[in-house]
Amino acid sequence: MAKAPVLTPQAEDFPRWYQDVLNKAELADNGPVRGTMVIRPYGYAVWERMQAAVDARIKAAGAENAYFPLFIPESYLRREAEHVEGFSPELAVVTHAGGKELEEPVVVRPTSETVIGEFMGKWVQSYRDLPLLLNQWANVVRWELRPRTFLRSTEFLWQEGHTAHATETDAAAYARRILFDVYENFMREVLAIPVVVGRKTPSERFAGATNTMTCEAMMVDGKALQMGTSHELGQNFARAFDITYLDDQGSQQVAWTTSWGVSTRMMGGLIMAHGDDRGLRVPPAVAPVEVVVLAVRDDADVVDRCRALAEELRGAGRRVRLDDRTELSMGRRATEWELKGVPVRLELGPRDLAEDRAVLARRIEGDKQPVPLAGVAGAVDEALTAAQTSLLAQATTLRDQRIAAVSSLDEAVEAAGVGWATLPWDLVGEAGESTLAQSAVTVRCLRREDGSLPDSEDEAGLVAYVGRSY
Amino acid sequence: MAKAPVLTPQAEDFPRWYQDVLNKAELADNGPVRGTMVIRPYGYAVWERMQAAVDARIKAAGAENAYFPLFIPESYLRREAEHVEGFSPELAVVTHAGGKELEEPVVVRPTSETVIGEFMGKWVQSYRDLPLLLNQWANVVRWELRPRTFLRSTEFLWQEGHTAHATETDAAAYARRILFDVYENFMREVLAIPVVVGRKTPSERFAGATNTMTCEAMMVDGKALQMGTSHELGQNFARAFDITYLDDQGSQQVAWTTSWGVSTRMMGGLIMAHGDDRGLRVPPAVAPVEVVVLAVRDDADVVDRCRALAEELRGAGRRVRLDDRTELSMGRRATEWELKGVPVRLELGPRDLAEDRAVLARRIEGDKQPVPLAGVAGAVDEALTAAQTSLLAQATTLRDQRIAAVSSLDEAVEAAGVGWATLPWDLVGEAGESTLAQSAVTVRCLRREDGSLPDSEDEAGLVAYVGRSY
């Protein structure tokens, strides 16, 4: 009799497969308040590595971390009209505190744009104070009607960058630096996800932005996930929050601002860009466990050798788990580590020990081969490097296979059934966006054929990437 | 005419000195909602280093990080009677979200004890699941009547550890491991603060705890600051949240839990334990800038040499700032770096350059000496090591000078005017605590003469440390 699969197969029910992976790989649970989530240790360990890699890139781009309050006076949100309109249906409001009703209710931040704008206004006085490059790691709350763990949760974790510049050119360049050098680079090199980078159409812009740029990832079911955005805010926020400065001629100027963010949503992207019917596949760069050493049998020599092997690999800088739960079957344990997406598994039994070898199983490539115990650390390093490369290559192939160049809206809708379509933006336009929306298809982003990103007002030669999305 | 001091002198008005340091060293600002704070980049960079050092120690103690929701159903807090009593006047309550009134209001976490208890109850099934060692880095909210930045803010950042164990002995040992190996070690070795470690009296225990242990630090004004606590919760929370397990005999048992935390309050401790009339003094281990290189004059050779020097020190792994703002006076710039507590300052002018030397100023020791440019990296390393050691030595001397052994409550109150008193716990007791409280003096902690910590029920030979506190 065939074993029941651990997970719902992707082809049968993709959303259910996603939910199964979340639960069975012990990534996350639903929180008690609707739409909130509990990030379990294994999931959080992945997030911590993502966070560290993004943080290092943000610091390399010159921004400094700071922390602003969770609670924002309601009045702040009203200052930038478009901004409040974008957020008001999603706000959580504290009306009582310290045992009494508050005189002015406070909002739990849906983003810190306004409160950071307020302080930038205080801190920026002269052109010498610019650029002011701030970043914050924090939780934010947006009340979601259709919450989904990691993808659209009422509370999520993110970083939000906010910068002020003397000129529009500086602001535009910095928003692009974050987009390409921080986000795209991180997503490709660390998450092994070959995102398509482009700008949003005017109707898909962030509330208050003059230009929104995005990194769009292809999920294995052909849908798109917006993984991160970088916004040029023009002088809208600077005017609303009085971010002005004296230039070197002594005259008062209004600053130009940007904002940009990535969130725990990327966890959903990681799961859905790489996962398969056996579970997660975690890129070594963010894997909490890079290699698991399995003792095949309850044999003192085997267990001792496995322990020594784990120590040796740890000494070589690897993140290692020893699995000596020999009371459980090998099959069950192997399935569990596959489910958790650990890139490399080393199995060692009495016969292997007799022959001075271990069996090295590669999760990404799905193969197994014996390796001599003497050279095991080198073999593991090689396998990990290969895993990172293979994941990116597989995801790139998948993405390219699922993108079809089309020349009409009808064809675009059809292509969106299995992936994305590209077509000239001239053929879409605002009217086309409405037509596509009737089939739940959206323009994910616009860019030039050669991958370059024109200024926000320049529409010449733009290609639209359209598809369904999370 | 004498220059006006940058800061209010400590002896004149200590609370005002504290406020001056916060503002002028650009550590923090008040947030727009009463009692909240903005942690500015320089302050946050110190906090990030504290966090990293604590996190590494927590991981070494075997606990794993996870993340639980900000919002907690009101009903959760009612499950553990003492716990809700301890927190209810401090709660912030969300009554409206998503544009409507909520059916059940949700509380913004004042601590995650209850929600983590709920999930521990789900995750713990068998003795094999124990110990379960969790930690969370998060923001929490307690509505404060008399807020003070870092010391007592409405929102603060902290870590909260929550663990479940099979036996009382295991739980007690783990609570002590965190107290000594994580907290005390971190405070002494990293923050250079020689905390006194003891247990709280029953009346000072955390709501719901059977034993609360604490790290108490001496501030330069002689008051105490509670820097971190570790609690044994007995089976109170485990019963309320059904954290039960099947033991190896197959019978149902109730687990024993602990919790423990440190917060941004430690930032206040760092400021008040080491600061002087010239400003902050930051231990090198958490200093965002370990060494600042100052170009004394606007001379191309000098500025170039300073830049090269900064690069050389960065290459040697130091955190370096180059100050080439030669349009400002040296005095003003030196004062600014002293205010920010940067441990080492290297000054280089044309005459120094001619003599192949720089002047090395040490913030902690308050001295200056020329060092040959050839050996500057070594001299800086040495100065940083010395700074860390000196700070701890100075703080230890201060602490010991300010602790007086006394033999009556009256003497204790008198001693608390300038520092702490020690006296036998037998002479205090609950009645004595009430008497001391009339003079705003509290028992900070109890421990044995030899520094050891008896079990919570054992009162023999206990010495009480009493004083005023923040």
Image (cartoon, coloured by chain):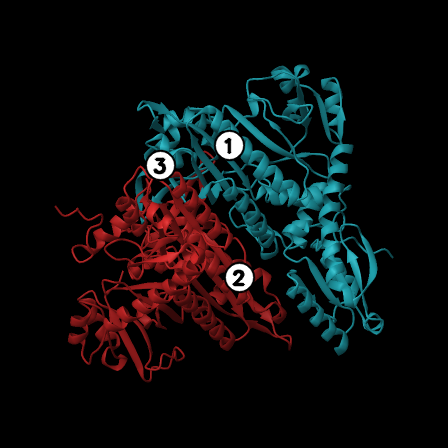
Chain colours: A red, B cyan
Residue B304 horizontal/vertical position (percent): 72, 75
Q: Which residue occupies the foreground of this view, A278 or B79? A: A278
Q: Is residue A50 left or right of residue B52?
A: left
Chain identifier of the residue bearing label 1 in the image: B
Within 10 Å of the Cα at label 2, are there few (<14), some (14-19), or many (20+) other Cα atoms? many
Residue A108 in sight from this viewpoint: no
Q: Which residue occupies the foreground of this view, A122 or B205? A: B205
Chain identifier of the residue bearing label 2 in the image: A
Mark 3 or mark 1, earlier in chain: 3
**Circle 2: residue type:** Leu
Q: Is residue A123 left or right of residue A193?
A: right
Of circles 3 and 1, the one toward us is 1
Residue A119 horizontal/vertical position (percent): 55, 58
Number of numbered tags placed on the structure image: 3
Of circles 3 and 2, the one toward us is 3
Residue B389 horizontal/vertical position (percent): 73, 46
Q: Residue furthest left?
A: A1
Please give the name of the residue rendered at 66% of the width and 58% of the height, measured from the top-left corner: B289
Q: Which mark is residue B119?
A: 3
> What residue did someone put label 1 on?
B174
- Asked if the residue under mark 1 is in contact with the one under mark 3, i.e. CB atoms within 8 Å, the reply is no
Q: Residue furthest right?
A: B1
Q: Secondary structure at mark 1?
A: helix
> What residue did someone put label 2 on?
A134
Q: Quadrant of residue A229?
A: bottom left
With respect to residue B227, does A446 lie above or below?
below
**Circle 3: residue type:** Phe
Residue A361 in sight from this viewpoint: yes
Q: Which residue occupies the foreground of this view, A173 or A237? A: A173
Give the distance between the C-alpha atoms of the residues marked 3 and 2, in whole angstroms.
35 Å
